[in-house]
Each structure stands twice: as structure tokens, then as C-alpha cells.
Image: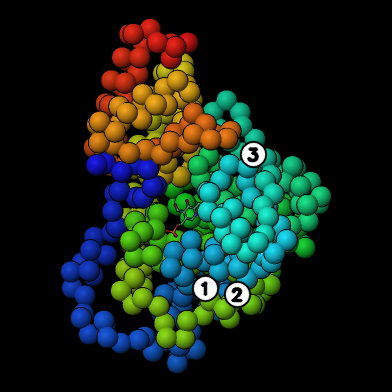
Amino acid sequence: MLYLDRNENLFGAAPECVDILHNADAAMLGTYSRDFLRGVKSTLSETLAQQLEIPERNILLSYGSEDMLKQTVHCYLSAGETMMIPQYSWWYYKSVADECGGTVAEYPLQCDQQSFSYDVKKIVSAIRSVKPQLLLIASPNNPTGNSLSLDELKIILNESPGARVVVDEAYFGFSNESSELLPQLTRQFPHLAILRTFSKLYALAGMRIGYACVGEQYEKLITYSARYLGYNTLSEQLALAALRNKEYYKHVGSLIAEERSRYYEFFDALDSCTAYRSNANFILVKIPSEAMVPLGEHLQSAGIAVKFYSTGMLASHIRITIGTTAENSQLLQVLQTFFTRQLITDSPLRR
Ligand SMILES: Cc1ncc(COP(=O)(O)O)c(C=O)c1O
């Protein structure tokens, strides 16, 4: 089965990460790290702090950004309180708010012909009326693929002093626009937290490692998330190797951008489909509702999985993870056969 449904980075981790796995020292299996005695959480948090130019205290480590999100929401959302999330977003946001007895309020996303975007004015007016405890922004957002610029984020931060603003940047590094400086905003805006992961760009999803950069209003989370006996030593070594190989990941990011364009080209040629522009390693595509079931069957028989959305406003949309060049060619070929057949048989897909 070819899995193009989970937004994994199928180009794989940097070769140095693979070398580390092959040459791992078995002695590390039985020991804790001693980093806490040096007054830091780990070598990884230290390295990230140096690279991002923020204090080590404000870098938190976690088992992926799912874990960090859960800790953050559990720390700051109590029963009856509200977290604001994008109208179309990762299902987990609502689920984790539910765990705390909190509610979610959705703020709208703008959609024009070929792209989604954040409507900063509407977000600001929603903050004023809802007064949420937590405001969650995903940049890029899953599944719509759109991001928020640094200037737009600053406007929102200036308008939301009463809320904690959490930016889920799981898909950072796939767009041309760099968000390298984003973590430094946590100095200026103590109510900002940025969640990042090694799962996506760095292709280490199986190692479950992520981090957050948080401002000083996250004091409770800083203490709550600290692990005095350290973190997963092997995951940390792989993450450190990934950080040493930024050129490799830059290259992978540009390959993924090229591959994304192949899908745009394919879907743009079909009047019945819309491929939304994305800054991530996936794209959202609107297809005719009558194609959902037959396309699902067609892909199933070809051994390819993509994500199908069947409810709400995204009904009749699919999300495709951008795979390697060969994997994308395989899927595009299968899609070509499907849509050509639909056109020849003069189905309702013909518009
Ligand atoms: C928007 C978003 N945030 C966070 C995650 C979680 O990533 P991880 O826990 O692997 O860091 C995902 C996973 O697909 C995601 O789509």
C-alpha cells in the first residue's frame, strides 16, 4: 500500500540520521541523560536555544507536537472555557479541548478560487467577542495548506493580550516564506507559544519528538513539561543530526514544492476539480461529490491511500500527501486513468 494520507515526509531523514541508527551505542539504552545536572533540559533544547536565539528555559521538548499541544491545552483550558480554532483544521484540536471539558469556537477562513487564507480582521473581531482562553492558529494549516505571515501574526498578538496564542507550526519549512524568526517573537509577546515537530520536514515521525518555544506567560507549562530524567536519547541524537543537516532538508523542501506543482498542473487542467495552493507537504483538492465513492474504490484497487473528507464543509474534498517523485508519478497515473474514464463515459463529472 502506498500511504499518501498522513502527511509524512516520504523523502526520508538525512543520511546522517540513518548512520546514527546503524551505529547507535547500545550503552545508551540503559542510562538516563545527565543533562539536568548541568541546568538544562537536554543538549537538544540547548542547541535549539542557540539556533533560535531564545533562552533554553523557553524551549520545551515533547513526544511530537501532538504531545505538546495536549500538555498546553490541559494546562490552560478548564471546563467551560473556550479555545478558538480555524474553521477547517486538524480534528485533534477539538478532541483535546473536549478532554478538558472546554469548548471550541471556530473562526472563519477565507477561500478564493484557488487558495485559503486567514482573515486577520475577522480573527481579531472574533477574539473581541468570544474572549477565548486559547487562540490556536495553524501555519501552515492542515488541511487547507495556507499560512499566516509574521506581520499578520503580530497584529493578532497585539489584539489578544487576554488570550494565550498557540501557533501550530508542524509543517514549517515547506514554503518559500521562511518563518525562521517566529520563535523570537516569544520575547516580545509573552502570551505566544510556537509548537514545532521533527515529524514533518525532518522526516522523523516515528521518533516522536517535537518542541515548543514559549513566552513567559507559560510558566506553569515550563515546569509541568520538564522531565528531570531526560528525554528519549536516541530520538534526541537523531533530532540533533537533523539540525546539522539543514541543507539536506532545504533541498527536500524544494523538491516537495516542485512535486506540489505537478499536482496543481494536473488538477488545473480538469474543470471539475480545484487544487488549493499549499505551503505544506500536502494539498487539498475539491472533487465532484459524485466522484468520491468511485475514486475511493479506484485508489483502493490501485493500492494507494489518500485522505477523504466526507462531512461538513469539506465533504467532497481529498487531501494528498506529496510523496517522492516516483510515488507522485504513480498516483498521477492512477488519477489520470480515473478522470479520463469518467470523461469518456460522459459521467456527471463532465462539466
Ligand atoms: C497540524 C498538525 N499539527 C501537529 C501534528 C502532530 O505531529 P507530531 O505529533 O507528529 O509532531 C499533525 C500531524 O499530522 C498535524 O497535522
Mark 3 Cα-neighbour bin, 10 Å: few <14, some 14–19, many ≥20: some
The picture places residue 129, in percent across and down from the top left corner, at 81, 50
Q: The residue tagged with tag 2: helix, strand or loop? A: helix
Q: Does 207 appear above or below 34?
A: above
* Residue that extends furthest to the right in the rendered view of this protein: 129
User: In this figure, which residue is indicated by the disc labeled 2?
Assistant: 221
Q: Tell me the residue at 61%/32% (across/down).
A: 111
Mark 2 Cα-neighbour bin, 10 Å: few <14, some 14–19, many ≥20: some
The picture places residue 22, in percent across and down from the top left corner, at 18, 69
The picture places residue 332, in percent across and down from the top left corner, at 30, 28
User: In this figure, which residue is indicated by the disc labeled 1?
Assistant: 60
Q: Nearer the viewer, mark 1 or mark 2?
A: 2
Cα distance, mark 1 to mark 3?
Answer: 30 Å
User: In this figure, which residue is indicated by the disc labeled 3?
Assistant: 109
Q: Tell me the residue at 40%/61% (across/down).
A: 198
Quadrant of the rendered image containing residue 15: bottom left
Q: Does 14 appear above or below 26?
A: above
Say which amino acid is labelled 3: Leu
**Between discs 1 and 2, the one toward the N terminus:** 1
